[in-house]
Amino acid sequence: MSGFDTLLFDKTDGVARISLNRPDVLNAYNIQMRDDFSQVLSAVQDDPDIGAVLITGEGRAFCAGADLTEFGTAPSQEVARRVRWQRDVWGQFLSLRKPIVVAVHGYCIGSGLEIALLGDLRLAAQGTIFALPEVQLGMIPAAGGSQTLPRNTRQSGAMDVLLTGRRFDAAEALAMGLVTRLAAPENLLEESMDAARRLAELHPDTVTAAKSALRLGQDLPLAEALDMETRLAGGVLR
Ligand code: COA
């Protein structure tokens, strides 16, 4: 699979690496990137040779958020946002049966942070700057951020990030639980590839069941969540 305008794709050792590839604009997320992601995620879901996904960004930033120039060309911000919703890329991320490792560096802003939050393990290079500036721009996050942020951090911290749009660094992101761990910038790719490779070596049914148990369980009452865990645990006994 190749030939995406906005993404690089390669497959090694059972890991599909998808890299945001608009470095001149700090990998700003545009409509074409949405379409490319949609296509690549469908292919990854169906490829039995892929056991894990690694998402990275080319150049000096992971992603500086939604492409602000597209907001200017659309008839209105509302239309620009609606266009993004016409494909449920965020749903595709969340329903991916394979584990997703996201490695962020430089800037991880707006949609960039929301993409990271749709992953399962998040590694950040020391020095990465994070923010969700949507509210300051008269919008709210619409790539799941208002839901995925409080599910990964404490509610009060999430509200602060959401309402103030303030920038914060990787050390704070780690303390909030927003990222899984930090890496030296020069080691980020190697460490995140190692993490993805280890996940790719596991039995796919086990990984899918564990992921589902945690993701689905957090939105269920405890008794139902425990039932679900029992069913999933039975399903992976071999
Ligand atoms: N959409 C479109 N283009 C963007 C962009 C975005 N979200 N973020 C950065 N770019 C472009 C800049 O316009 C610039 O292009 P140019 O070289 O043609 O002028 C290029 O990327 C480099 O950005 P620059 O601002 O020069 O880099 P910086 O290191 O000085 O600042 C940021 C980095 C991330 C602080 C700054 O680019 C920024 O604030 N971006 C917007 C973040 C944002 O509000 N995102 C929307 C969230 S909803």
Image (spheres, rainbow, N blue to C red):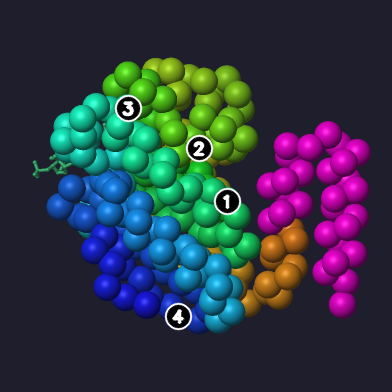
Q: Is residue 50 left or right of residue 170?
A: right
Q: Is residue 232 magenta?
A: yes
Residue depth check, mark 1 versus mark 4: number of the one nearer the observer = 1
- For residue 78, the mark is 3
Q: Earlier in the sequence, mark 1 or mark 4?
A: 4
Instruction: Work out how far the residue at label 1 is from the one at label 4, CA to CA, in angstroms.
Output: 23 Å
Q: Which segment is the magenta one?
A: 211-238
Instruction: Work out how far the residue at label 3 is from the one at label 4, CA to CA, in angstroms.
Output: 40 Å
Q: Are marks 3 and 1 in contact (CB under 8 Å)?
A: no
Q: Is residue 204 magenta?
A: no
Name which residue type carries label 4.
Thr
Percent coordinates x, y for residue 110 in the rendering: 36, 36
Name which residue type carries label 1.
Leu
**Residue at image mark 4:** 12
Q: Are marks 2 and 4 in contact (CB under 8 Å)?
A: no
Q: Are marks 1 and 4 in contact (CB under 8 Å)?
A: no
Instruction: Work out how far the residue at label 3 is from the one at label 2, CA to CA, in angstroms.
Output: 17 Å
**Residue at image mark 1:** 94
